[in-house]
Amino acid sequence: MSDDVLQGYRKSIDNIDAALVHLLAERFKVTQAVGRHKATSGLPAADPGREERQIARLRRLAEEAELDPEFSEKFLRFIIDEVIRHHQQLRG
């Protein structure tokens, strides 16, 4: 049995998921470049002040977009933690 409405929603979800993957890939390319720069410049892998500003910024954006700010913070925290792990690996 086919439900065209459901299939349409699923196609939209699939397209959004693909866009998210591509955006994350681009973001990680940039953060890898940041990590290399930090490693060669002797800068620390983490910047807690920047992280907190970014989380606050994302929470505001989430509220404006009617997205749960708690979810957005957890999502960004996961990404930040992964970026820091990569930066630490670059430092050796």
Image (cartoon, grey):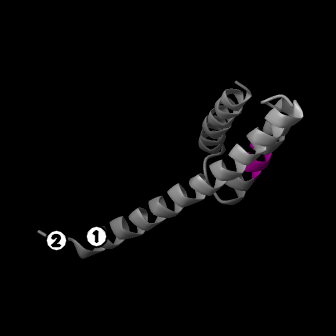
In this view, the residue in front, 81 or 5, is 81
Residue at (61% x, 53% y) in the render? 67
Mark 1 or 2, nearer chain start: 2
- In this picture, residue 46 sits left or right of residue 92: right
Image quarter of the C terminus: top right
- In this picture, residue 82 sits left or right of residue 88: left
Q: Which residue is mark 2?
A: 2
Q: Is residue 17 magenta?
A: no
Q: Which residue is mark 1?
A: 7
Q: Position of residue 60 (x, y in %)?
A: 76, 51
Q: Is residue 36 above or below residue 27?
A: above
In this view, the residue in front, 58 or 89, is 89
The local crowd at label 2, few if under 14, some if 14 to 19, many if 20 or more residues have their Cα within 10 Å, is few
Tag 1: amino acid: Gln
Residue at (65% x, 32% y) in the render? 81
Residue 52 seen anywhere in this rendered image of the structure = no
**Region rendered in magenta:** 55-60
**Label pair 1/2, CB-CB below 8 angstroms:** yes
In terms of secondary structure, what is the magenta stretch mainly?
helix
Q: Position of residue 72 (x, y in %)?
A: 63, 45
Tag 1 secondary structure: helix
Residue at (67% x, 37% y) in the render? 83
Q: Position of residue 73 (x, y in %)?
A: 66, 40
